[in-house]
Amino acid sequence: MTEKTAPGVVRVERPEDAPKVFQDAFNAGDLDGLVNLFEPEAVLFLGPGQVATGPTEIRELIGHFLGSLGRWEIALISHNRVDDIALNTVEHTLYSTAPDGSTNTLSVRAAVVFRRQADGSWRFLIDNGAPFG
């Protein structure tokens, strides 16, 4: 499924495994690993005003959420593949605790496009994490 080749380097061997890989890296606080899952020209869209392109912007956007969110679960809803391109529809469920001790749960669906790399692994190309569905 995944192979951790070095600190902060996480590989996705099959695009249908990417939700678990991303979830585990996020919950472990592995910012380097998360950023490495994206292609250099990748786009991460979380909603109006929350668009990141390329590793520097993606690192900044994910880093902002990494410290402020609790546990993240990601479930694969559908997976489609044509040659070296794949599309996953996933459901994100975020669990957090407010300063007053109350718990919050947010669930959204997202669409993610992957591209197979020369080494056979898969990386995020477009991550449309804005709520839909």
Image (cartoon, helix red, strand yellow):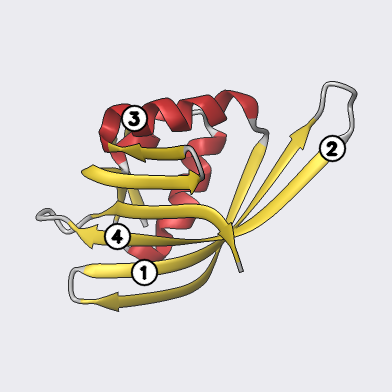
Image quarter of the C terminus: bottom right
Q: Do the residues labelled 1 and 2 touch (CB within 8 Å)?
A: no
Give percent across and percent down for residue 86. Answer: 30, 69
Residue 87 is tagged as 1
Whole-angstrom CA distance, mark 4 to mark 1, is 6 Å
2 and 3 marks in contact (CB < 8 Å): no
Q: Residue at x 47, y 26 (%)?
A: 63
The residue that mark 2 highlights is 103
From the image, state whether disc 2 or disc 3 is nearer to you.
3
As measured in the structure, the alpha-carbon distance from the residue carrying label 1 to the one carrying label 2 is 32 Å
Q: Residue at x 26, y 36 (%)?
A: 54
In this view, the mark in front (3 or 4): 3
Q: Which kind of residue does numbered mark 2 sit on?
A: Thr
Give the spatial CA distance, label 3 vs label 1: 23 Å
**Residue occupying the far front of the picture:** 48
Residue drawn at (31%, 52%), measured in percent from left and top?
124
Task: Give the structural element (helix, strand or loop) at label 2.
Answer: strand
CA gap, disc 2 and disc 3: 29 Å
Q: Which of marks 4 and 1 is nearer the N terminus?
A: 1
Name which quarter of the figure residue 32 lies in: top left
Callout 1: few (<14), some (14-19), or many (20+) C-alpha neighbours within 10 Å? many
User: Label 3: which residue?
Assistant: 57
Q: Where is residue 115 in the image (x, y as percent from the top left)?
A: 23, 60
Q: 15 above or below 64?
A: below
Kindly indicate whether the residue at mark 1 contacts the one at mark 4 (C-beta within 8 angstroms): yes
Q: Distance between the residues labelled 3 and 4?
A: 19 Å
